[in-house]
Image (cartoon, helix red, strand yellow):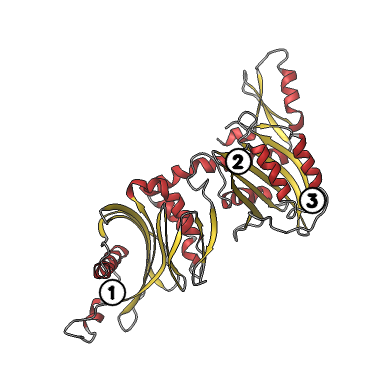
Amino acid sequence: MRTHACGLSLSVFVYLLVLAHPVPAQQIPPGYDLRTDHRVSGAVLVNSRPGSGGATLLMRQSLGEVRPFFGQMRLLGAFADKKYDQRLELLFAATAGHSTVQGLGIATTEPGRGTVVYAFDSPQTITQTLPVLLALAGHGGGQDPTRGLNWQVQYFPDGSGQMELPDGWQFTFANKGMVSAKGPQGQIERGVRSLVYTRAAAAQMPRIGGMGYQGLVCDPTDPVTALQALTAYSNAFAQARGISPSNLLRVVEVVSTPPVPGYAQAAFVDYEYETGGARHRAIQYILLGNTNMDGTWVLYTTYVASRSDAFAQNLPVLVRIWGSARTSQHVIHERIEDAMRNFREAGEIWQRATQNRERSLERSHANWTEAMRGTRTILDTRTGDRADVDLGYASDIVRKLNEGEPGRYREVPLRELVR
């Protein structure tokens, strides 16, 4: 979508004038989510709501709502989609707590829903942190399937952690950081730790009722072997309870990754399985522990799964849920996106689903950078020569130059250079 620098409507300016009066800061507005990331400074306010109005109306409403958070707010510039009114960006300076910040506010609309984001940081670091903050907001354009869903942070039923879930999802199990959940896009199970006996150790276990040890038995040779043993073990319990077993169909790919401290091997496994007559696809993270003197070792697994016919559509949603979990095992989930980029087939699906969002973030960052730099490039379409001029006078300069030769000169916004 092509955007244009523009002035705001009088009603938006009125709201900005109201916001200029100091009020108690740091009161997070109802319905807004304040997000931060340990990798960068700054923060982002996010709100998504149902509705059918345009971006200008959405921003006008939002500016009144964020008044308790931003004690003072001063407009530095704006960019808008004039034709369809589906996107509006505000460059602003404000106060948050006792600090001066600069930031970018973005209002976007799509059928039945609108989203508003305020990413802000100190004036010294905002140009470096803005892309990460916008990504943290899950903000973007195009066909990103995570957009338009009502995301809420939910605490595990036993209070041992939290996870961000969209509408329609619910927890089915939780115990000391281990949790499972299901929803329209599939299911997730994470943090499951199992004590495993090697075959040699199991052979030495006492025989009860004429039978040997009935627990999970497997040598820690490789992640796929462990997955096969865990599936067979789970199926034995499923059959006893009249639940459909899971039959492994094929392993699509295995991506090895450095194990966390205390474990010997780690890998992400992309595979398909059949259960209840339906074909599913899963990506499972598997950690193999070191073998103890008594022949036991720890198997850690966490996975996301969806019906195979909807896997491409649901994968970004599942990965977002997966990476949002927060318990003492958070280090594992910081590696999820890196692993996704290393998969061939699943990685291509992930890239296609997110590339439009990434381009949108780059354009937003370019708009901000250009405004703060205060210059815009003018192109001579005949010679290819370029020159940087004052941003505020760029349109007037081009209009004047084109009086003698219409259409020869044009503005080149920085966002066009990052496409």
Percent from the top left, x then y, of residue 140? 56, 43
Q: Secondary structure at mark 1?
A: loop
* SS assignment at label 3: loop
Image quadrant holding the C terminus, namely top right
What residue would you read off at disc 3?
72
Mark sitting on residue 216: 1
Q: Are marks 1 and 2 in contact (CB under 8 Å)?
A: no
Give the residue at x 78% y 43%. Answer: 16
| Mark 2 residue element | strand
Residue at numbered disc 2: 108
Callout 2, which amino acid?
Thr
Of residues 78 and 197, the one nearer the viewer is: 78
Q: Is 277 displayed left or right of 93 in the figure?
A: left
How many residues crowd mark 1 within 10 Å: few (<14), some (14–19), many (20+)? Answer: some
Crowding at label 2, few (<14), some or many (≥20) Cα neighbours within 10 Å? many
Label 1 to label 2: alpha-carbon separation: 51 Å
Kind of residue indicated by mark 1? Leu
How many marks are shown on the rendered structure? 3
Task: From the viewer's side, name the closer residue of 146 and 328.
Answer: 146
